[in-house]
Image: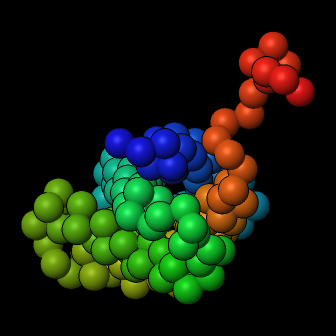
């Protein structure tokens, strides 16, 4: 594994932790401010919300790792279209994951469809997609900024001949 690939993977892990933290925080604060539940159906169960968040965090992580290790350092750019696609797919995936978990939990397609439509009207899926867009944009910017840096920063005692 090359040095730039190691850097991209470590940066993607930190970005995924940042994304998970932001999503959990914004869903919690948004739920308090709007006085609405993230998962509006009480019959859905307590694990639908955390499971849906887990699915989108893993998706964003895998997407960042793949783009980071596949793109050579000299080709790294700030990827606006990549970030927009990541945000939109994350938004759809949050809705689909919630509906799928309800479908498997209850076996009723009507309740799964009702949950997806109620989640579509609430701001929470949109916020999850927006933060996926922002974090993936920041990730691509940091990868592009790392180009030509000459590797990791050196401690003062590691610099020979300066």
Q: Residue furthest left?
A: 107
- Give the quarter of the image for residue 65: bottom left
Q: Where does residue 103 sit, x and y in percent of width and height?
A: 18, 68
Q: Could you say which is closer to the camera, residue 155 or residue 97?
A: 155
Which residue is found at the position 31% from the left and 59% from the top? 44
Left or right: residue 128 versus residue 35 is left
Q: Is residue 112 or residue 14 the one in the foreground?
A: 14
Q: Residue furthest top?
A: 157
List x then y, in percent, for residue 39.
45, 62
Quarter of the rendering occupied by the N terminus: top left
Residue 137 drawn at (x, y percent)? 64, 69
Q: How many marks?
A: 0
Q: Residue at x 14, y 61 (%)?
A: 104
Q: Residue at x 21, y 81 (%)?
A: 110
- Rendered location of residue 113, percent (x, y): 28, 82
Q: Is residue 60 left or right of residue 1?
A: right
Q: Is residue 123 visible?
A: no
Name the quarter where the C terminus is drawn: top right
Residue closer to the observer: 159 or 149: 159
Q: Is residue 86 left or right of residue 116?
A: right
Q: How is the image coloured?
A: rainbow
Query: What residue appears at the point 66 percent right and 64 percent down from the top-left corner?
Result: 144
* Residue 74 is at least partly visible in this image: yes
State whether residue 118 is above or below residue 21: below
Q: Is residue 127 left or right of residue 121?
A: right
């Amino acid at each position: 594994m090359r040095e730039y690939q190691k850097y991209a993977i470590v940066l993607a892990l930190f970005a995924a932790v940042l994304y998970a933290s932001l999503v959990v925080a914004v869903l919690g604060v948004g739920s308090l401010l709007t006085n609405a539940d993230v998962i509006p159906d009480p019959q859905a169960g307590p694990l639908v919300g955390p499971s849906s968040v887990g699915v989108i965090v893993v998706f964003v992580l895998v997407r960042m790792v793949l783009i980071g290790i596949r793109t050579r350092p000299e080709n790294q750019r700030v990827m606006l279209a990549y970030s927009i696609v990541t945000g939109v797919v994350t938004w759809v995936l949050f809705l689909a994951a919630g509906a799928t978990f309800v479908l498997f939990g209850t076996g009723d397609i009507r309740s799964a469809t009702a949950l997806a439509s109620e989640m579509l009207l609430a701001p929470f899926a949109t916020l999850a997609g927006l933060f996926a867009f922002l974090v993936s944009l920041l990730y691509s910017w940091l990868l592009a900024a790392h180009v030509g840096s000459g590797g990791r920063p050196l401690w003062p005692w590691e610099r020979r001949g300066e």
